[in-house]
Amino acid sequence: MTTPQTGGCLCGEVQYQVQGTLDKIIACHCVNCRKTAGAACSHNMVIKSDQLSLTQGEPKMYVDTAASGNRLFRYFCGNCGSSLFSRREQMPEMTVLKAGSLDDSNGAHIAMNIWTDSAVSWAHIDPSVEHHATNRPPPSAK
């Protein structure tokens, strides 16, 4: 997908711009991501934090504790509740962008599934795509 890409929340109160390549989606099936997405999994794109800039509004933040005990900062619109992105406390230089918050995510594909041991029975996980029963090694962005 070409850059810059734009995205934001459902109501438009919080908007952002992303520089860089956005083509690989990681589907996370952990319980916390399922709950924050309100779906079978959360579709995420890992980027460097300096590639993301807010262009309108300020998201609210929720501090979550992952299964590992590490803290995860989840950012969302305080008005409509849309999930936007998250950052690990120990890796603030990386951002996990919610693919569904992009204005146009066509051209992206699911490159990996993680926490598949936590997946709900009705989730489709393509067996030809890389998958991990729990987490994978820490992410890196291109």
Image (tube, grey):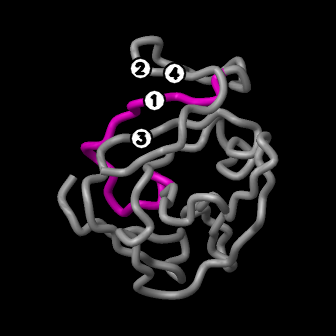
Query: Whole-percent x and y of residue 9?
Result: 53, 70
Q: Which residue is mark 3?
A: 25
In the image, 68: left or right of 134?
right
Q: Which residue is mark 2?
A: 129
Determine whether the residue tagged by mark 2 lies in a helix, strand or loop.
loop
Determine whether the residue tagged by mark 3 lies in a helix, strand or loop.
strand
From mark 1 to mark 3, how far is it between C-alphas? 7 Å
From mark 1 to mark 4, how far is it between C-alphas? 5 Å
Q: Are marks 2 and 4 in contact (CB under 8 Å)?
A: yes
> Mark 3 or mark 4, which is nearer the start of the sequence?
3
**Residue drawn at the location 18% of the way across and 58% of the way down:** 2
**Residue drawn at the location 53% of the way across and 20% of the way down:** 125
Q: Are marks 1 and 4 in contact (CB under 8 Å)?
A: yes
From mark 2 to mark 4, how far is it between C-alphas? 6 Å
Q: Are marks 2 and 1 in contact (CB under 8 Å)?
A: yes
Magenta residues, as a range?
A: 98-116
The numbered disc on residue 131 is: 4
Query: Whole-percent x and y of residue 36?
Result: 70, 52
Determine whether the residue tagged by mark 4 lies in a helix, strand or loop.
strand
Q: Is residue 35 magenta?
A: no
Specify the amino acid type for callout 1: Met
Specify the amino acid type for callout 4: His
From mark 2 to mark 3, how far is it between C-alphas? 11 Å
Mark 4 is surrounded, within 10 Å at the Cα level, by few (under 14), some (14 to 19) or many (20 or more) other residues, namely many
